[in-house]
Image (cartoon, rainbow, N blue to C red):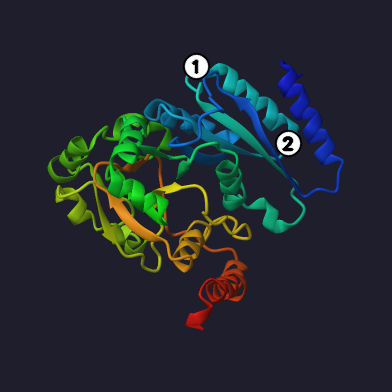
Amino acid sequence: PPSSERERMLVCEWQDFANSSDHRRQVPRVIEGATVDRSVSVDEISLAIHGSIDRMDKLLNNAKRWVGPISVAIYTKSAQQIQESFNFFKANARALSKVSFHFFFEKILVEKDKLYPHNYVRNCALNFTYAEYVIILDMDFVPNRRAYGDLKTLVKTDKNVRGKLQNRTVMVMPAFETSLIFENEDDMTLGLAPPSKPELLRAVHVDETVEAFHLTKFAPGHGPTNFDKWYNFNEDTSYDIEWDEGFEPYVLAKREGLPWFWTNFRGFGKNKLSWYEDLDVMEYNFAVLRDFFVFHIGTSSVSGKFPWWTGYEYSKVFQVFLDVKARDLNPQKN
């Protein structure tokens, strides 16, 4: 049975949802850590993360590395998962003291609904944070140590970085992963992630235990970051790059004005990439932060198969949407 008034209220909300004609429902800020400050928004930076309850253990890695606010959307398909979510929070209340949890309810009505709705829950986490700036991460990525304090200082004191963020530039945090082979994902711990850039450079060039994320598997995904330049760059706190087709980095961005993620992409394929294509149409610029990065803790693959309908959705629906949006934004170009 529910053990708190808030849990009982959410279970009642679920029951109301289950008996309604709603296909989906968002319930924001259901659980908030003890030190979440709703009054702070200007200059605040939050992680925006999504996941299902069976992946929440990975959130603890982010809570250890990021001492600022974290907005988490939990994909929920049953009342049992609500209880599991509250149990997780109670068991880790101190570690999650700056985390706000939002619940995204969904009914499985058609075959497509069985696939994880990345972009619905990304939008949920993005929409319900108070912060002026966001870093939209997947659950199995963590930022470098001290990233929160150092980024807040950078945004406040570096006029160049602040000016870019205020004027439609997203700041890329280069992505890395271990080059070691693990048979069991549970063996991949936070200790794999270098805490700082000097230690990461040593792991890349000396120990050869770290490499750029998926660069050898799918170069367009992160290639435009220009890792060779980043390794040796000391001239400024960031450098400009050009977006290219296939590029889907992890970024720091000003939340106001960002597009929503296209929700019809579910499961493997196009779910994050489509957002960057939208940014490109909106004439966002891209720059790479010199001293910051994110690190993947978990097994990964780029060999997944697209659901049969993804190609049609991408070429016949989403691309038409982008064409219309481009004409609306720049009528003189057409």
The residue positioned 33% from the left and 59% from the top of the image is 217
Kind of residue sitting beneath label 2: Ser
Say whether disc 1 or disc 2 marks the residue closer to the N-terminus.
2
Whether tag 1 and tag 2 are in contact, CB under 8 A, the answer is no
* Quarter containing the N terminus: top right
Q: Which residue is mark 2?
A: 78
Whether residue 204 is visible, yes or no, is yes
Label 1 and label 2: CA atoms lie apart by 26 Å
41 left or right of 204 in image: right
Check the image and report above or below for 27 versus 224.
above
Q: Which residue is mark 1?
A: 94
Residue 175 rendering spot, x and y as whole percentages:
33, 48
Check the image and report above or below for 309 versus 195.
below
Residue in front for this viewpoint, 158 or 67? 158
Q: Secondary structure at mark 2?
A: loop
Whether residue 174 is visible, yes or no, is no
Kind of residue sitting beneath label 1: Arg
The residue positioned 27% from the left and 45% from the top of the image is 179
Q: Secondary structure at mark 1?
A: loop
The residue positioned 63% from the left and 26% from the top of the image is 31
Residue in front for this viewpoint, 22 or 67? 67
The residue carrying pointer 2 sits among few (fewer than 14), some (14 to 19) or many (20 or more) residues within 10 Å by Cα, namely: some
The residue positioned 50% from the left and 81% from the top of the image is 332
